[in-house]
Image (spheres, rainbow, N blue to C red):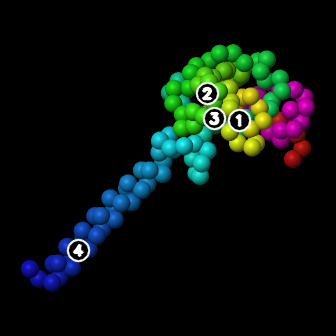
């Protein structure tokens, strides 16, 4: 065997091992890998699957007036942070499309958790506003810039 063939073979082996390593690394960076680990830590948000759709959970904020407009919807079938929820159930908010936003009973896990519900936002979280604001009290609307409050 010539020295050139050994060097070329070594580079080919190195390239193959590198390609496999990068493929494994990038496959673990996707949203599915966040479902395998603890949510709300590092780059993984708190996630919840409901009726085959993936939602991102917010902090347990106080939204006075919201509780009066909740109706039972569906269970949370999978989450990466079960300790963030008092129950693995969701509620529809008024007549808002449930693919946009749901509410789930919250447990206080983070210092900023001050409410009894976490809002679960679908893939287009901005689309839940301003319709969601209609279910807040006037004071809560004024406090949230997404409801037209001054920034």
Give the quadrant of the N terminus.
bottom left
Going from N to C along the chain, the mark reached first, 3 or 4, is 4
Q: Residue at x 23, y 74 (%)?
A: 10
Give the SS element for disc 4: helix
- Judged left or right of residue 114, residue 46 is left
Q: Nearer the viewer, mark 4 or mark 1?
A: 1
Q: CA distance from mark 3 to mark 1?
A: 7 Å
Task: Give coordinates of residue 126: x percent, y percent.
Answer: 70, 38
Give the SS element for disc 2: loop
| Residue 11 seen in the figure | yes
Q: What residue range appears in magenta?
A: 128-146
Against 5, is 15 above or below? above
Residue 10, label in figure: 4
Q: Residue at x 61, y 44 (%)?
A: 40
CB atoms at circles 3 and 4 under 8 Å apart?
A: no
Residue picked out by circle 3: 84
Residue extending furthest toward the left: 1
Going from N to C along the chain, the mark reached first, 4 or 2, is 4
Q: Residue at x 58, y 19 (%)?
A: 74
| Residue 127 seen in the figure | no
Residue 132 covered by magenta stretch: yes
- Judged left or right of residue 147, residue 54 is left
Residue picked out by circle 1: 108
Residue picked out by circle 2: 99
User: Label 2: few (<14), some or many (≥20) within 10 Å?
Assistant: many
Going from N to C along the chain, the mark reached first, 1 or 2, is 2
Task: Give coordinates of residue 67: x percent, y percent.
Answer: 77, 21
Q: Quadrant of residue 98?
A: top right
**Which of the two residues, 70 or 129, is positioned nearer the viewer here?**
70
User: Label 3: few (<14), some or many (≥20) within 10 Å?
Assistant: many
Give the SS element for disc 1: loop
């Amino acid at each position: 065997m010539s020295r050139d063939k050994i060097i070329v073979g070594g580079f080919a082996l190195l390239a193959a091992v590198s390609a496999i390593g990068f493929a494994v690394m990038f496959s673990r960076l996707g949203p599915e890998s966040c479902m395998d680990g603890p949510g709300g830590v590092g780059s993984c948000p708190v996630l919840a699957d409901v009726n085959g759709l993936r939602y991102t959970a917010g902090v347990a904020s106080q939204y006075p007036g919201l509780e009066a407009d909740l109706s039972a919807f569906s269970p949370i079938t999978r989450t990466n942070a079960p300790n963030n929820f008092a129950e693995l159930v969701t509620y529809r908010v008024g007549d808002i499309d449930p693919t946009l936003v749901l509410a789930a009973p919250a447990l206080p896990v983070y210092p900023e958790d001050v409410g009894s519900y976490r809002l679960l936002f679908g893939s287009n979280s901005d689309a839940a506003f301003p319709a969601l604001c209609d279910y807040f009290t006037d004071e809560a609307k004024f406090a949230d810039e997404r409801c037209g409050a001054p920034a």
